Image: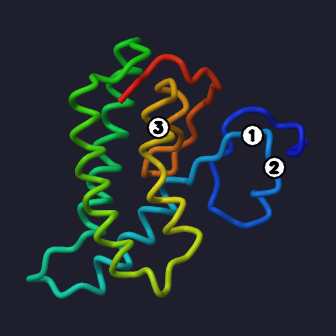
Amino acid sequence: MLPAFRGVAVHDAWSPYDTYLVADHQLCCAHAARELQAVADATPERDWCWATQVAEALVEMQKLVTSAAAAGRDTIHPAALAEQIRLYRSAAQIGANQTAARSTKLMRATTRWPDDCSTARTTTCGSPPTGEYRQTTTDPSAISA
């Protein structure tokens, strides 16, 4: 079944999923949120943490998607999305630089998420951070960052 799957596969970055070349891939937000929370938990309370900013931007992007879908819109407000992507990318770049020596597939997949989301219909932005299932579609034409 999976080799012929043509939708958006939302998953945990387990390497066997990489063999499914026809499907689009998205990292499950619940998995990303847990990994980011682990980084934040290891950071002294008084210090700013890049992982917290990344997680907050992911949550805000999902709220934009949820709000647009609830209103029956196929697009996210471009300026609102652009601001969350900016926050996400700036923090993720700091995190990538700080963790380059021990970078994992999950970290690399997490840093690509907004590009995938910003060029997809609201319903392809996948699972919200709660892990709740969301139906997907493969039409990438509706939203631009």
Q: Position of residue 7 (x, y in %)?
A: 72, 33
Which residue is found at the position 38% from the left and 78% from the top?
Answer: 38
Please tell me whether residue 21 is drawn above or below residue 111 in the rendered image: above
Badge 2 marks a residue whose secondary structure is loop
> Is the C-beta separation of discs 1 and 2 under 8 Å?
yes
Disc on res. 23 = 1
The local crowd at label 1, few if under 14, some if 14 to 19, many if 20 or more residues have their Cα within 10 Å, is: some
Residue type highlighted by circle 2: Tyr
Return the residue at label 3.
117
Which residue is found at the position 30% from the left and 87% from the top?
Answer: 42
Please tell me whether residue 20 is drawn above or below residue 140 in the rendered image: below
Q: Distance between the residues labelled 3 and 2?
A: 19 Å
Q: Position of residue 142 (x, y in %)?
A: 48, 17
Disc on res. 20 = 2
Which residue is found at the position 33% from the left and 65% from the top?
Answer: 93
Is 2 left, or right, of 75 in this rendering?
right
Q: In terms of depth relative to the viewer, which is nearer, 6 or 89?
A: 89
- Earlier in the chain: of badge 3 and badge 1, it is 1
- Earlier in the chain: of badge 3 and badge 2, it is 2
Residue type highlighted by circle 3: Cys
